[in-house]
Image (cartoon, grey):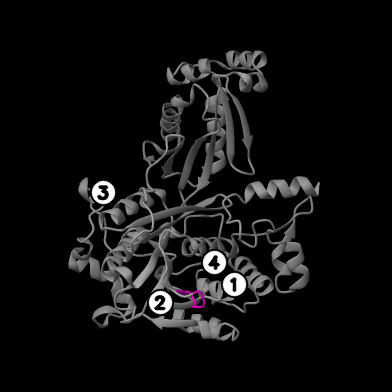
Amino acid sequence: MAGKRKRKNAAERRGIHPRNKYSDNPPDFGLLASLYPSFEPFVFYLRDGRPKIDWTDFNATRELTRVLLLHDHGINWWIPDGQLCPTVPNRLNYIHWIEDLLASDVIPTNRADCDVINGFDIGTGTNCIYPLLGASILGWKFVGSDMTDVAIEWANQNVESNPHISHLIEIRKVHLEDNMDESQISQKCGNEGGSECSNIKSEETRSGTKKSCYNGPPVLLGVVKDEEMFDFCMCNPPFFETIEEGGLNPKTSCGGTSEEMVCSGGEHAFITRIIEDSVKLKHTFRWYTSMVGRKLNLNTLVSEIWNVGATVVKTTEFVQGRTSRWGLAWSFLPASRKMLPSHKIEENNLSFMLEGLHRQQSGFDVLKSVESHFSESGASCKLDSATFNVDITASKDQIDSILKAETHNTVDAAEFNRSNSPNDQQSQPDAMRFRISVLQQNPGALLVRGSLLDRSSSTSGLFSPIFQHLKDVLINKFCTGRGIKL
């Protein structure tokens, strides 16, 4: 029983960095409840005895973060009500990815081995999670910046509550431009017409779609001091354009204020400002990095970075449960070896977004529709609700049937399955084997991803049109034409 549960958990934790403390040992809510009485009231048990917490309860998620930081990392931590509450495993993924970037030979370093790594956290927030984890685990030095008084106050308090690492972390107040107070920031872009975005022309701009620009306080320029040098910057940007958009996910409650979650133009505009600043600061940072919440934005931002003359662009994917995020990194320093653009999509890994889903439509509904779509043509389908994957094996005849949009009634499909078992289909040399995954994105948005499991099949070249056909079916059913190809 224990072995089966461990294998299931390992599948659910795909995408966790291998050096992440929770990669092989996920948090044990039962153990934590027995050790920390303040956490015990938030833990309940399922019929099979597994401990759970209510992820829609902000107090429960905040207390979980507090006890994890204390129990596993020796960090004392707290945030006031309503502030953004980070998930520890997800934040560790980002820290370890930056560690990989710094350890790689893509961008050589001139530092001595004994020098301390210097990082810059853009918008550290009240939680100050990245500096606390980076300093505690890896001994890195950090400057954490923010603009609001409450963020500066609580970030400093969290640093001072950990005297063993407090000397490694500086919290820096961002001074608002033109003596604006915090309530005036939202007015600036509308009054100035978005001229600050003109330095970088995105694919949407070139195609005629106007993108809102970032209109807030300084990000890097005006915050980084003269003569300062950093190994990297990192950022968990404001993902949304409105606070209503940020609060649509009914399955989680991680808090978050408008200053933390929202800016004009959303994450695309905010990260574009980081790119603009990086063009001017160039070699001040060895690596510029940011988290990205939507793959559509990732692809656009990668193109923008290449266009402004970066020497290296790197991306990665962070998968936490059913939520997918991406890491984006770039540099202007000379690369030690020839780099190919990392934004080219391989034929055997395709994806698209389903946006505008209604609240009652879940990722599992989409997953069941995927299974039904291929089963109706007689293909073998194996749905795994734990990992939100459907593994499909389809013969050449079934593929032709799908692409020709031939309809089979239920009796025909059942009869076909009786005469062609999954094992028989898999043994056919022309059978295509592929996987469809459904991942939660922003509220009301899902990422549908397809990947070939056997590239040697003679039918593998038909994977792209099969996936395009699935896209059309799901868009018509769930999004009334609002799907976005990636």
Give the residue at mark 3. 204
The reply to whether the magenta stretch includes residue 247 is no
**Which circle, 1 or 4, is nearer the viewer?**
1
Choose the circle earlier in sequence order: 1 or 3.
Answer: 1
Q: Which residue is mark 1?
A: 137
Identity, as a three-letter code, of the amino acid under mark 2: Asp
Residue 122 visible in rendering: no
Horizontal side of 318 relative to 41 (left or right) equals left
The answer to whether residue 295 shows anywhere in this view is yes
Q: Secondary structure at mark 3?
A: helix
Q: Which residues are magenta?
A: 113-118
Q: Which mark is nearer the camera, 1 or 3?
A: 1
- SS of the residue at dot 1? helix
Left or right: 103 as drawn, with respect to 26 = left
Residue 449 vs 444, above or below: the answer is above
* Residue at numbered disc 4: 86
Residue denoted by label 2: 146
Secondary structure at badge 4 equals: loop
Judged by its main secondary structure, the magenta piece is loop
Residue 441 drawn at (x, y percent): 47, 50
State the image coordinates of residue 44 (x, y, percent, origin top left).
Answer: 73, 60
Give SS at disc 2: strand
| Callout 2–callout 4 Cβ contact below 8 Å | no
- Separation of disc 1 and disc 4 at Cα? 17 Å
User: Which callout, 1 or 2, points at the residue further toward the start of the chain?
Assistant: 1
At 42% from the left edge and 28% from the top edge, which residue is drawn?
469
